[in-house]
Image (spheres, rainbow, N blue to C red):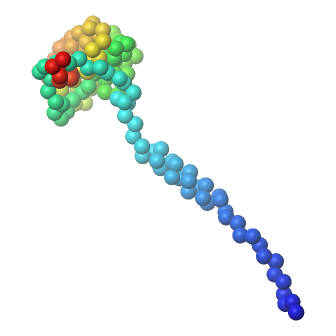
Amino acid sequence: MKLQQEEREEPEINLTSLIDVVFLLLIFFMVSTTFERQALLRLDLPEASTAESESVPDRVEFIVTDDGRLFIGEDELVDPRQATVQAAIAERFRQQPEAVLVIRADSEAPHGLVVRVLDSAAAEGIQRVSIAALEDQGQ
């Protein structure tokens, strides 16, 4: 004797809510991730026997790359002329008047650009200037 025969439905997994959760996680990780621009810039700093470890609390970094590009902090300067460099330094030191200017120049960077940065700092009256170097390993 057969009682009622029920037709069994196959259970299904609703993927819509799962996809929504995955997209929310993806958006969360994209927004919360920080990227360091310095990792993109490869600098070979020159070595110096009097190099000290970095212990400067407030600093403004000016980077001169081997191909002649100039960066102040994370911002690239579009024009390497003296007036542009001086205006960029002046703007940063208006925001941080007690900071130290740290020049990070590649060992193959054009010497004229480093002098231009130093001259611009002097024209702005910045007295606390440092040039980043690696400690000499006695080679």
Residue visible at 17% across and 22% down in the picture? 137
Residue visible at 26% across and 25% down in the picture? 61
- In the image, taking residue 87 as reference, residue 5 lies left or right, namely right
Residue visible at 46% across and 47% down in the picture? 29
The C terminus, quarter of image: top left
Q: Residue furthest right?
A: 1
- In the image, taking residue 122 as reference, residue 2 lies left or right, namely right
Residue 48 pos. (x, y %): 16, 18
Question: Foreground residue, 26 or 8?
Answer: 8
Corner quadrant of residue 40: top left
Any part of residue 36 in sight: yes
Residue 1 pos. (x, y %): 88, 92
Residue visible at 81% across and 81% down in the picture? 6
Residue 121 pos. (x, y %): 20, 16
Q: Residue furthest left?
A: 50
Corner quadrant of residue 104: top left
Any part of residue 130 in sight: no
- Please give the count of numbered marks on the rendered protein: 0
Question: Foreground residue, 108 or 18?
Answer: 108
- In the image, taking residue 6 as reference, residue 51 lies left or right, namely left
Q: Residue furthest top?
A: 112
Corner quadrant of residue 136: top left
Question: Foreground residue, 139 or 54?
Answer: 139
Residue 92 pos. (x, y %): 27, 26
Q: Residue furthest bottom?
A: 1
